[in-house]
Image (cartoon, rainbow, N blue to C red):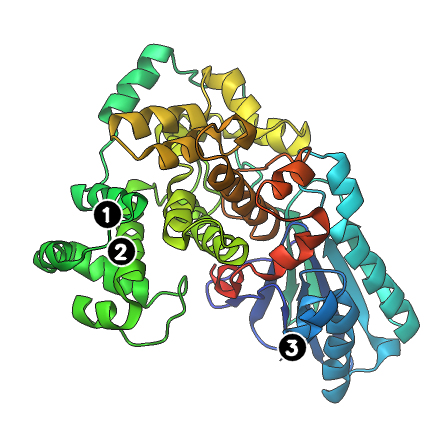
């Protein structure tokens, strides 16, 4: 049954590692699911229900002390107890389960980890023990999906994310190499202040005096930086209202990262329909990969966090070149990546004769990016090919992978995990630490929608 979206109905996204419970009212609860598992529960007679968004099967070590709602094993009992407190009875509850996808391309590593499958098994076991009937279930597969609960009628809907709305057609523009070169030549360069900061960060120079003066004179950029500091992305909650206050609160290095991030907002398209599955999807993905790269660098301790951040931020700049061509060929790319399980870069190569890492490498060379950044841009899908900065490139690959698997519904990207074990070893981590890395994804990335 389709859930109609009305202008007067409130849409509430339920972040990973949390739940929302509601009485009957004009509201739709949504969970955007890739590897994660969503559980909708409701009791029609008590007129109460809710939605739980599960990140992982069970806590590891001391992790349970953090957020028990992250896990199927601990979060679902809490969710059920909260519904009981509102008058719901297990024998009257109805459940819908979704998610747990093996978000392709599929590899033996995915089968071994099977995070979503194990979460779903735990969910089904607990529901059976509680005597709660499962009315609808769509688990596994290769698709990211949205689980919706319409609380004024207790209806649920499971639908894949990013399906093209128009009919598939092979009649679309396949750009020539000449046309792609013209597009590369016409790409508006990012502001000089951003290029200057990127080089400073990767050269290990953080002097702010000259840059602060330059930034204060640019009222438009100053406004963007302040808005970003106070946005849901960074969740600072510090009421930053000036560059000087930002400098005091954040310090030089973090402010430099904020400035670069703010300048990219206009560089990446804010429209949906190309690589982006939602408005601003490319930019959101860039910021998220940057924040996860920063977390990974902090954990491993081998790479400066500001270098990791800017590398994560800039890794997909090649998509800016190809984005306009993707829009007309979206059904082709959707079929290739989501149905036939072909990697995005292979689909790009089939379509354009060039991939977004290769196109990004051309831009990086033209803009004289530091070599460390150029390698990440060019090889983040195949980090083994990086020569001078392999650890940084592997780190950004892993951050990109975590975004594509767990923060879904933003852009058209699926990374291969065939060599995940050896790639994790390159940053000093083992495969059994994968769930720990998932737990370290900044929570605000799940909350931003």
Residues packed near mark 1 inside 10 Å, few (<14), some (14 to 19) or many (20 plus): many
> Going 12% across and 59% down the picture, which residue do you hit?
209
Residue sitting nearer the eye, 89 or 371? 371
* Image coords of residue 122 (percent x, y): 83, 62
Query: Image quarter for residue 46?
Result: bottom right
Give the CA distance from mark 2 to mark 3: 40 Å
Q: Is residue 280 visible?
A: no
Relative height, residue 211 to residue 29 (above, below): above
Q: Are marks 2 and 1 in contact (CB under 8 Å)?
A: yes
> Going 81% across and 64% down the picture, which residue do you hit?
123
Mark toward the viewer: 1 or 3: 1
Give the CA distance from mark 1 to mark 3: 45 Å
* Image coords of residue 317 (percent x, y): 37, 35
Residue pointed to by mark 2? 256
Residue pointed to by mark 3? 21
Q: Considering the numbered disc 3 on the image, is that residue within a helix, a strand or a loop?
A: strand
Residues packed near mark 2 inside 10 Å, few (<14), some (14 to 19) or many (20 plus): many
Residue pointed to by mark 1? 197
Relative height, residue 188 to residue 440 (above, below): above
Q: Where does the N terminus fall, quadrant-wise? A: bottom right
- Nearer-N-terminus badge (2/1): 1
Q: Considering the numbered disc 1 on the image, is that residue within a helix, a strand or a loop?
A: helix
Mark toward the viewer: 2 or 3: 2
* Image coords of residue 5 (percent x, y): 54, 58
| Left or right placement of residue 352 versus residue 191 in this view | right
């Amino acid at each position: 049954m389709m859930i109609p979206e009305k202008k007067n109905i409130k849409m509430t996204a339920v972040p990973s590692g949390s739940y929302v419970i509601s009485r009957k009212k004009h509201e739709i609860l949504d969970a955007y699911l890739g590897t994660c598992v969503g559980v909708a529960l409701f009791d029609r007679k008590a007129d109460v229900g809710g939605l739980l968004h599960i990140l992982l099967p069970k806590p590891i070590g001391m992790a349970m002390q953090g957020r028990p709602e992250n896990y199927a094993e601990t979060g679902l009992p809490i969710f059920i107890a909260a519904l009981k407190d509102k008058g719901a009875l297990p024998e009257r509850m109805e459940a819908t389960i979704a998610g747990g996808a093996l978000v392709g391309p599929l590899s033996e590593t995915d089968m071994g980890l099977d995070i979503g499958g194990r979460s779903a098994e735990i969910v089904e076991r607990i529901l059976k023990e509680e005597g709660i009937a499962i009315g609808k279930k769509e688990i596994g597969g290769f698709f990211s999906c949205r689980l919706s609960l319409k609380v004024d009628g207790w209806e649920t809907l499971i639908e894949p994310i990013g399906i093209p709305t128009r009919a598939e057609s092979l009649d679309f523009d396949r750009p020539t190499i000449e046309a792609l070169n013209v597009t590369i030549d016409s790409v508006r360069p990012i502001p000089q202040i951003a290029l200057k900061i990127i080089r400073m960060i990767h050269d290990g120079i953080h002097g702010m005096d000259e840059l602060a003066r330059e930034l204060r004179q640019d009222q438009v950029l100053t406004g963007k930086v302040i808005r970003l500091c106070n946005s849901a992305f960074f969740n600072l909650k510090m009421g930053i209202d000036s560059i000087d206050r930002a400098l005091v609160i954040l310090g030089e290095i973090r402010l430099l990262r904020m400035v670069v991030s703010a300048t990219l907002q206009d560089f990446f398209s804010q429209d949906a329909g190309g690589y982006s599955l939602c408005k601003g999807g490319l930019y959101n993905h860039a910021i998220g990969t940057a924040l996860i790269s920063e977390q990974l660098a902090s954990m491993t301790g081998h790479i400066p966090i500001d270098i990791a951040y800017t590398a994560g931020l800039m890794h997909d700049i090649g998509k800016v070149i190809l984005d306009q061509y993707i829009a007309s060929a979206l059904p082709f790319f959707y079929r290739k990546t989501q149905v036939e399980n072909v990697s995005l870069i292979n689909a790009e190569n089939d379509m354009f004769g060039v991939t977004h890492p290769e196109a990004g490498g051309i831009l990086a060379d033209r803009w004289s990016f530091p070599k460390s950044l150029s390698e990440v841009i060019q090889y983040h899908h195949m980090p083994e090919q990086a020569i001078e900065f392999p650890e940084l490139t592997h780190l950004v690959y892993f951050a990109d992978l975590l975004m594509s698997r767990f923060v879904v519904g933003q852009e058209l990207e699926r990374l291969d995990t065939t060599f995940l074990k050896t790639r994790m070893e390159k940053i000093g981590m083992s495969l059994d630490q994968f769930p720990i890395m998932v737990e370290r994804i900044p929570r605000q990335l799940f909350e931003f929608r």
